[in-house]
């Protein structure tokens, strides 16, 4: 590369070396080290002999306002939630797109297992209740034909009816 001075004549090697040395010394000279700021505050004021220490005002230097940080956190949460819902929908639709006999059986297998367990539990309970009943009648039997029936139904989807029969 050819260095040129202001009068557009070529520089000699000694002039180019002197100019390069001057540029390096002025532009790339080592600066004074950067001043480091403390990351904590130390209060050297005297502490009272008894009681609590009085509060010391510490300046608040927030870079971002509180409302902006709240909106940022909320938007990250909404984005993560929507991404999760989208991934779940994608997985469901991928599964529905490849419906085979094996996939249908694998989907219905837990429901069939629950139904089988519920049936077995119900059968065991009904057998246990019927095996315990033993009626021994002693004394006279009277038959009354007057029945006062009072019926109460509560609930909408899961309704409960209570019948009170008084003799």
Image (cartoon, helix red, strand yellow):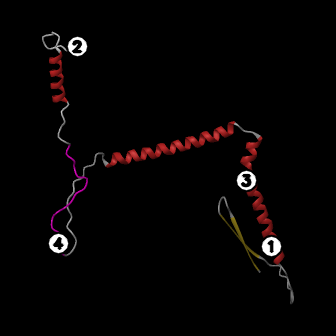
Q: Which label belongs to residue 48?
A: 4
Position in image of residue 26 (x %, y %): 15, 29
Between marks 4 and 3 in the image, the one whose residue lies nearer the viewer: 4
Q: In the image as oriented, which residue stretches furthest toward the left?
A: 7
Element assignment for label 2:
loop
Q: Which label belongs to residue 111?
A: 3
| Camera-nearest residue between 144 and 60 | 60
Q: Where the C terminus falls, by quadrant?
A: bottom right
Check contact, mark 2 vs mark 3: CB within 8 A: no
Q: CA distance from mark 2 to mark 3?
A: 85 Å
Reply above or below: 9 against 116. above
Q: Which residues are magenta?
A: 34-49
Q: CA distance from mark 3 to mark 1?
A: 26 Å
Check contact, mark 1 vs mark 4: CB within 8 A: no
Q: In the image as oriented, which residue stretches furthest toward the bottom?
A: 139
Q: Which label belongs to residue 128?
A: 1
Would you call the spot at circle 2 few (<14 residues within 10 Å), some (14-19), or many (20 or more)? few
Name which of mark 1 and mark 4 comes first in the sequence. Answer: 4
Q: CA distance from mark 1 to mark 2?
A: 107 Å
Name which of mark 2 and mark 4 comes first in the sequence. Answer: 2
Q: In the image as oriented, which residue stretches furthest toward the top?
A: 9
Check contact, mark 4 vs mark 3: CB within 8 A: no
Position in image of residue 113 (x %, y %): 75, 56
Name which of mark 3 and mark 1 comes first in the sequence. Answer: 3
Q: Which label belongs to residue 145?
A: none
Q: CA distance from mark 2 to mark 4?
A: 74 Å
């Amino acid at each position: 590369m050819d260095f040129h001075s202001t009068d557009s004549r070529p520089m000699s090697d000694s002039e180019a070396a002197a100019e390069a040395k001057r540029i390096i010394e002025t532009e790339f000279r080592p600066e004074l080290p950067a001043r480091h700021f403390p990351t904590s505050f130390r209060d050297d004021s005297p502490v009272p002999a008894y009681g609590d220490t009085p509060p010391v005002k510490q300046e608040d230097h927030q870079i971002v306002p509180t409302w902006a940080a709240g909106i940022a956190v909320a938007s990250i949460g909404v984005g993560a939630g929507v991404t999760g819902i989208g991934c779940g929908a994608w997985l469901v639709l991928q599964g529905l797109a490849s419906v085979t006999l094996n996939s249908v059986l694998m989907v219905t297998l837990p429901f069939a297992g629950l139904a089988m367990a519920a049936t077995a539990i119900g059968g065991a309970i009904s057998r246990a209740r019927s095996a315990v009943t033993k009626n021994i009648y002693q004394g006279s039997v009277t038959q009354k034909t007057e029945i006062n029936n009072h019926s109460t139904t509560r609930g909408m989807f899961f309704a409960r009816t209570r019948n009170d029969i008084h003799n």
